[in-house]
Amino acid sequence: MKNAVAAIALLALTFSAQAYEFEFTGRVTYTDGTLIDVTSGTLLQGHFSADGLRNYSIPLGTGVATFYTFASGQVVANIAGYVISSANPSINIYDNFGGNVEDVFNVSSGYPAIVNGVSHPNGGFGFNLATKPGNTEVIRDRGLPTHIDVSAFDGHSTLNYGYLQRDGGQRGTILAFEVLSVTVVPEPGTAALFSAGLLALAPIGRRRLQA
């Protein structure tokens, strides 16, 4: 009985930790020519981590916006030999916003944005996925989603985009990209806890079969 309680506790701890690694891919739709060999159609891939431990919700429109922020961490992407990175990413989730968009999944980096060692103090890197008014079925809760269906975000105007900027000015965009996929996998620590919980439950299952 004690073993069962311990195993269940491990599994509960796993899910309460909510540690995820987000991986994403994209395709360049615009470049200012700053990055050599990066042209329209060039593919990129990246990742960022989220633990969901620092979050708060505020009323926004007819729904509630949930913001996840991090004391440490990075968003990193690779494109045509260039490494783009920035610290302290945040995830903004809008569930039934009720304004010019309904559901939103947004990733925004902190400052600076670094490209192959070159720092842009006011730069940023991230992407935005949104649904048009009336489509409320994409984000169904206000926590970190375990699955993100990019195709369900039905492009509305220019509200679906990815970007790398040297600053927020009109000519500050280095490149823009469309998001092709976002996948979520448990971080190693979470996976280890989950495995430990399953292993602890295994002898219990065997004893029941032998009874």
Image (cartoon, helix red, strand yellow):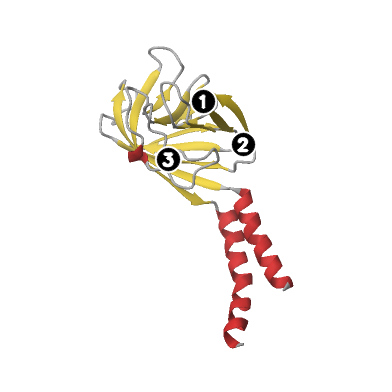
Q: Secondary structure at mark 1?
A: loop
Percent position of residue 94, x then y: 50, 31
Q: CA distance from mark 2 to mark 1?
A: 32 Å
Residue pointed to by mark 1 = 62
- The residue under label 3 is 46
The residue that disc 2 covers is: 72
Asked if marks 3 and 2 touch (Cβ < 8 Å), the reply is no
Mark 2, secondary structure of its residue: loop
Q: Nearer the viewer, residue 3 or 119?
A: 3
Q: Quadrant of the N terminus?
A: bottom right
SS class of the residue under badge 3? strand
The residues bearing labels 3 and 2 have C-alpha atoms spaced at a distance of: 17 Å
Residue 57 in picture, x, y percent from top left: 61, 31
Q: Nearer the viewer, residue 80 or 156?
A: 156
Of badges 2 and 1, nearer the viewer stands 1
Q: Is residue 84 left or right of residue 27?
A: right
Three-letter amino acid code of the residue under disc 1: Thr
Tell me how far mark 3 sits from mark 1, CA to CA.
Answer: 33 Å
